[in-house]
Image (tube, coloured by chain):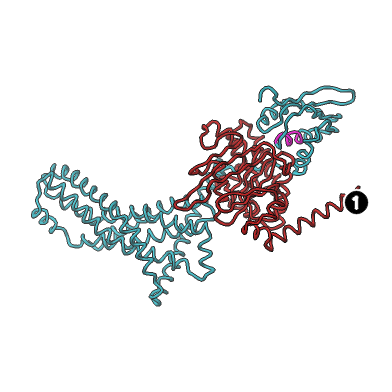
Chain colours: A red, B cyan
């Protein structure tokens, strides 16, 4: 899977986004392949979230073309839109849970919208989704305002996964989580990817999760995007990319990851 | 979807009962699978095999339904065994199994759907009302104390903020206040002249209009418009700041939110409401005068003559009431803003509440003033 280009599930071509006089994206191209975890990084204000919003159709670009599952997001009909929306899940930065509904009801919203299910089954599925994202028992009955930031994020992920989507878009999923929770979140995404063949589009600043779960990295620099595997990015000479991956934090994350790989390698050798 | 829908078929093998699951076990087919599973008569105390060879597609919802079936069978004392699971589905089943089975969350059910609940709710509301009044009184105390402290340090008073508030609450609402009171003046004169003509007293139309506008309608309309326009804005502004933790940030920096947020709004409104009332009175009488001229042919000299017969106190009564109404609107608006919890939903709820409460209290106070003024016989 990593590095092996399958069919592109998201295609962005010549994207231009402009707000007032400020150009955020200028002729940006991007492919996301089925089954990969793509980490999107970039400095503050480089347009990571704008890119995500454009792909899911919340932001209309000035120019360019966005295709998801082979459908052109900008020109498709309302019916196609619903079909596509069933196949993706979006986790917003602070969860974006509906504050008047409990966590379980939040998870049920997409189920209710798309499938005619008995209430009991819907409750059971919602409870299961709440469990699978690692929220403790009883969280389903709580309202979003009663949850901590990390729990809101998990609840948001439970809602994003409610329909077992093919793509999940994550906007800074581990920001504001403690390192253990962030590690759990990474593990969760990795497991879901391997069991469901999920495609993950992840905007992140967390170098650890970048090293831990991303197959490819897309860096937003100079209003365009550069994609490649981590190894390629580590060799990139662009000043921003270089300082991003070779700064103290980048080195630390790299070190811990190579240590981990070394350990695994040794275990593998020992078991042989 | 219909062509390869999920199936769950029962058959006998020597010594064991076999359930063969097949087709697409997905969230899209979950409702159908669930219906079929419920329709099956579950055995008990047998050896049961779940044959999963026929499953083409599986997602977490489907996997969960399989595991639920397995659990249901085990609970009935069957010895359950799964077989022929395709290797590609193994991680998914493992992951779903690891998440465990969690009891569904109860739906929040409003308690007042029962009679006892209904009575309890009346009690709750009454108690809450008392607690609110107490709390509003406390807030009034805090604001007064802060205002008094400012009297000793007048330089702490933020004139820029006060003027900004005056612009927002005063200047910007001038057009709507003027237009509405003008129209009310027109309506009163029009309606009043008809009735007064019946008694041959249509000349008193000017007095009728002027007295009702000056004593009651001018100030009341202005206060109600400002409660809707500015009181709600106060709640929404301060409430949004609460949601964003801006108020907490202010406290940690050492700023007093009452001094920074409440006093400029309070003083601003106390200054603008009398001015707006004056303007409203003028426009109302102007509207009434125009109507009197159009309908009854009362010219300017006669009009002024009529006005001069009104007791001079009438000119002041509305103006006297206006700062008190300003205090009510500003305090309620700010108080409700501070009551916002950390959710966007409560901003909306409390904004509505603030407008209703402010209008209610303005009218109650106005009634109190009526009694007071009639006791003074002015």
Q: Which residues are magenta?
A: B61-68
The quadrant where residue A87 appears: top right
Q: Nearer the viewer, residue A186 or B346?
A: A186
Q: Disc 1 is attached to a residue of which chain? A: A
Asked whether residue B204 is drawn in magenta, I would say no
Q: Residue at x 41, y 54 (%)?
A: B232
Is A116 placed left or right of B269 in the picture?
right
Residue A127 x/y as whole percent: 68, 42
Q: Position of residue B15 (x, y in %)?
A: 90, 25
Percent from the top left, x then y, of residue A138? Answer: 68, 47
Q: Which residue is mark 1?
A: A270
Q: Position of residue A94 (x, y in %)?
A: 59, 51
Viewer-closest of B284 and B173: B173
Left or right placement of residue B155 versus residue A27 in this view? left
Q: Secondary structure at mark 1?
A: helix
Q: Quadrant of residue B226?
A: bottom left
Q: Residue at x 78, y 56 (%)?
A: A258
Question: For this rendering, which residue is in front, B2 or B180?
Answer: B2
User: Is residue A26 at all visible to an observer of this figure?
Assistant: yes
A94 over A75 or under it: above or below: below
Which residue occupies 51% across, 62% down? B246
User: On screen, A190 above or below B174?
Assistant: above
Q: With respect to residue B41, does B291 lie above or below?
A: below
Quarter that holds the N terminus of chain A: top right
* Prevalent SS, magenta region: helix
Q: Quick check: B148 left or right of A245? A: left
Task: State whether residue B107 appears in this view.
Answer: no
């Amino acid at each position: 899977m990593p590095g092996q280009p399958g069919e592109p599930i998201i295609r962005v071509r010549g994207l231009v986004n402009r707000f007032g006089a400020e150009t955020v994206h200028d002729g940006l191209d991007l492919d996301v392949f089925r089954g990969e975890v793509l980490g999107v990084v970039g400095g503050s204000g480089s347009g990571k979230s704008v890119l995500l919003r454009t792909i899911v159709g919340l932001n209309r670009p000035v120019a360019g073309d966005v295709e998801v599952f082979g459908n052109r997001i900008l020109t498709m009909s309302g019916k196609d839109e619903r079909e596509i929306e069933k196949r993706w899940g979006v986790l917003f930065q602070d969860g974006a849970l509906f504050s008047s509904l409990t966590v379980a009801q939040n998870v049920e919203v997409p189920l209710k919208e798309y499938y005619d299910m008995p209430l009991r089954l819907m409750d059971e599925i919602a409870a299961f989704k709440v469990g699978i994202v690692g929220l403790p028992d009883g969280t389903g009955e709580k309202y979003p305002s009663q949850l901590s930031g990390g729990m809101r994020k998990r609840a948001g992920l439970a809602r994003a996964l409610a329909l077992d989507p093919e793509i999940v878009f994550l906007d800074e999923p581990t920001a504001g989580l403690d390192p253990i929770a962030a590690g759990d979140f990474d593990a969760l995404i990795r497991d879901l990817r391997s069991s469901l063949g999920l495609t993950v589009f992840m905007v992140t600043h967390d170098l650890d999760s970048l090293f831990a779960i991303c197959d490819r990295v897309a860096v937003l620099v100079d209003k365009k995007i550069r994609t490649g595997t981590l190894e390629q990015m580590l060799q990139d000479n662009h000043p921003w990319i270089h300082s991003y991956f070779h700064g103290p934090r980048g080195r630390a994350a790299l070190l811990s990851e190579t240590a981990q790989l070394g350990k695994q390698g040794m275990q593998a050798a020992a078991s042989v | 979807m219909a062509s390869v829908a999920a199936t769950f078929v029962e058959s006998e093998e020597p010594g064991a009962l076999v359930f063969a699951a097949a087709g697409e076990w997905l969230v899209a087919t979950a409702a159908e699978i669930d219906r079929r599973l419920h329709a099956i008569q579950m055995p008990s105390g047998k050896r049961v095999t779940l044959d999963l060879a026929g499953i083409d597609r599986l997602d977490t919802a489907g996997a969960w339904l399989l595991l639920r079936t397995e659990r249901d069978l085990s609970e009935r004392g069957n010895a359950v065994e799964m077989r022929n699971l395709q290797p590609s589905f193994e991680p998914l089943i493992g992951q779903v199994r690891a998440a465990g089975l969690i009891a569904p969350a109860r739906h929040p059910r409003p308690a007042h759907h029962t009679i006892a609940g209904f009575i309890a709710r009346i009690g709750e509301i009454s108690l809450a009302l008392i607690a609110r009044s107490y709390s509003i009184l406390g807030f009034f105390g805090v604001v007064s104390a802060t205002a008094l402290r400012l009297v000793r340090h007048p330089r702490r008073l933020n004139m820029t903020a006060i003027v900004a508030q005056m612009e927002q609450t005063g200047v910007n609402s001038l057009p709507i206040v003027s237009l509405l009171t003008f129209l009310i003046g027109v309506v009163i004169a029009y309606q009043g002249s008809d009735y007064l003509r019946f008694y041959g007293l249509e000349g008193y139309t000017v007095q009728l209009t002027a007295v009702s506008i000056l004593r009651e309608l001018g100030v009341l309309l202005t206060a109600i418009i400002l409660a809707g326009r500015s009181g709600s804005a106060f709640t929404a502004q301060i409430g949004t700041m609460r949601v964003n933790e801006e108020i907490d940030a202010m406290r940690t920096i050492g700023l007093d939110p009452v001094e920074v947020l409440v006093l400029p709004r309070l003083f601003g409104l106390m200054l603008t409401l009398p001015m707006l009332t004056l303007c409203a009175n003028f426009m109302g009488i102007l509207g009434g005068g125009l109507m009197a001229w159009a309908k009854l042919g009362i010219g300017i000299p006669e009009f002024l003559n009529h006005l001069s017969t009104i007791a001079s106190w009438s000119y002041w009564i509305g103006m006297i009431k206006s700062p008190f109404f300003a205090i009510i609107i500003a305090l309620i608006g700010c108080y409700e803003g501070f009551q916002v919890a950390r959710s966007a939903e409560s901003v909306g709820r409390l904004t509505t509440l603030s407008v209703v409460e402010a209008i209610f209290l303005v009218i109650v106070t106005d009634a109190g003033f009526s009694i007071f003024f009639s006791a003074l016989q002015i």
